Amino acid sequence: MRIIHATIYSMEQEPIQDGFLHSENGIIVGMGKTEDIAVHPDDYDACGGYLLPGLVDIHTALGLKEECSRFEGNDFNESSNPITPHMRALDGFFAGDKAIDIARRAGVTAAVTMPGNMNLIGGQAMAVRLSGKTTADMCMRASCGIKFALGEEPRAAYGAYGKPPLTRMAQAYMLRSTLEAAKKAMEIGRGTDEQKALFPLLSGKAPAYFHANREDDIEAAVRLSKEFGFRLIIVHGADSGIMANYLATEKVPVVVGALTLCNARMESIHLGPEIPNQLYKCGVRFAITSDHHQSPLYLLAVSAAFAVREGLPVKEALKAITIYPAEIAGLDDQIGSLKEGKYADMALYSEFPLNYHARTKQVWIGGEMVL
Amino acid sequence: MYREAVEGKQKPAYDKKMEALLPLMRREIPMHVHASRVDDILTALNLSEEFNLRCVLVHCNDAALILDDLKNRAEGIILGPMYFTCRDWESANGGFANARITSEHGIPTAICTDSCPMLGSVTLLAPSAALAAREGMDDGEALKSITITAARMAGIENRVGSILVGKDADIVVFDKFPLAFDAKATHVFIDGRRVK
């Protein structure tokens, strides 16, 4: 499969004007200037459109909190117990979720979908590529991280009913004792389902996605990650802009968003489109998220444009919705940029993708058209 | 009945609830009806005709399915919010493309954010119009949908909604075309006084 006459933003090199991209068996095998190849009638003519790697959002509830649904398709908070690392997004995922098609139409080709914020440990995140009909078709990595949450939500979900955690003190204690028990279980090689689910985290194979907004919650997450030696990713990070120097020193990445919502909680009062630039200026690794289901995936690129309005360089904004999230989620060996050897997952836009008139002309996943 | 009595000789006892409806019955203000599905939209239109009321439909997610009724029987529609995930079945047919379809059909179309906690922010008003423009709504119509068209549906077009001699000096200056997602409001004036 070959695309010709495209303006290629690969996220790896300077943009290629009038470029071509060649893929075989779903994998990119070559890129360059169209003038250097003999064009063929079967080539897809991009007519000067903008070809980017498919967008990537690594904090979503795709397939777990379904479009239109209230309770019927709401499978992302197992709020019967605050500690559920053994719950898997894979088992709650519905490949027929209309939001998946909405995402594809906006050029989003991959996502990490994960349990919600009510539990201190919500469960296991799954990486998906948005082609095919079934969960098996879409699943890229069945378990690519563990979802944690600190702050107001677990306290509202449990504390409000007199159950622990009522306070941030209990949140830290409950997480610490769970992780300590899992660590001991790992040493002896056996444990409960809950404990076994934490082994990949404690052995460095999977990162922790921590819902943390306020300074105290972000610091609590950093303390836990240092104590137990796991890889930490801060999600939302309303106060991360204020703490940018600290996060740069601690080398903790932030997945920031949603940048498009009204503030609904005290903890996220500082969440806004100026944060990506604050993180960028201080050298913190970051990605932008739509925070689907809170906002739809077609606002991912719009969020990046809002960050540009607040000073983030355009190049950084594009990377923040492609290669940076892929790197943070550990998926950059396969997706996130256009490079030989990676999946031919691409979106073609009629105009520069952050422009309001930019329409998604075509999307390919594994070299196959999906629109 | 209350209206006939108030305007007749035999004054009834003052009724706060009924008084609130008098401007509506006198057609001084329209009713704004939350109606998404075709059935709800038709109920609203039927009621408005039965009682000779002005009718503006809000959300109106099924608009594209019922264009002629909207054009002939409603004063206008307020579409939105259109920037968030669909959270109920009655909104399933919503979307920015509707704004193009209804405005092309000659239905006065305003766009709203429905701003409140956990929904999108009111700062998404211009981006909402921009996303409608992306789906084919004319840029000028998109700008009107968040200025003069909206003002008309609120009955405040004699004071705001357009720049015209005699109207309030409520003006915003953007550093680039206001539908661009990275456009910034650099100056905002209300009654001619700078507030930003």
Image (cartoon, coloured by chain):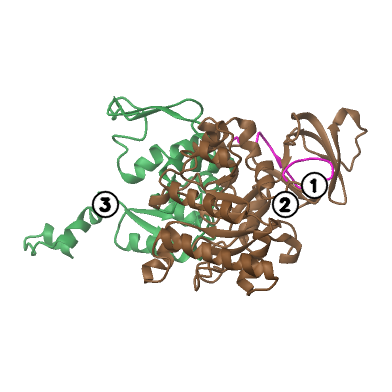
Q: Kindly indicate which chain is depicted in green in the rendered structure.
A: B
Which chain letter matches label 3?
A: B
Tell me the element at label 3: loop
Up/down of A93 relative to B170, above or below: below
Q: Which residue is drawn at 44% across and 37% down?
A: B144
Between marks 1 and 3 in the image, the one whose residue lies nearer the viewer: 1
Res. B35 in view: no
Between marks 2 and 3 in the image, the one whose residue lies nearer the viewer: 2
Q: Distance between the residues labelled 2 and 3?
A: 48 Å
Tell me the element at label 1: loop
Q: Is A341 displayed left or right of A69 in the figure?
A: right
- Name the amino acid type tagged 3: Arg
Q: Are marks 2 and 1 on the same chain?
A: yes
Q: Label for residue A344? A: 1
Which chain letter matches label 2?
A: A
Residue B108: image quadrant is top left
Relative depth, front residue between B63 and B52: B63
Q: Which of marks 2 and 1 is nearer the N terminus?
A: 1
**Callout 3: few (<14), some (14-19), or many (20+) C-alpha neighbours within 10 Å?**
few
Which chain letter matches label 1?
A: A
Q: Kindly indicate which chain is depicted in brown in the rendered structure.
A: A
Give how far across and how far down residue A347 sits, in percent: 72, 44
Please state the extent of the stretch shown in magenta in the rendering. Answer: A336-355
Q: Mark 3 points at which residue?
A: B27
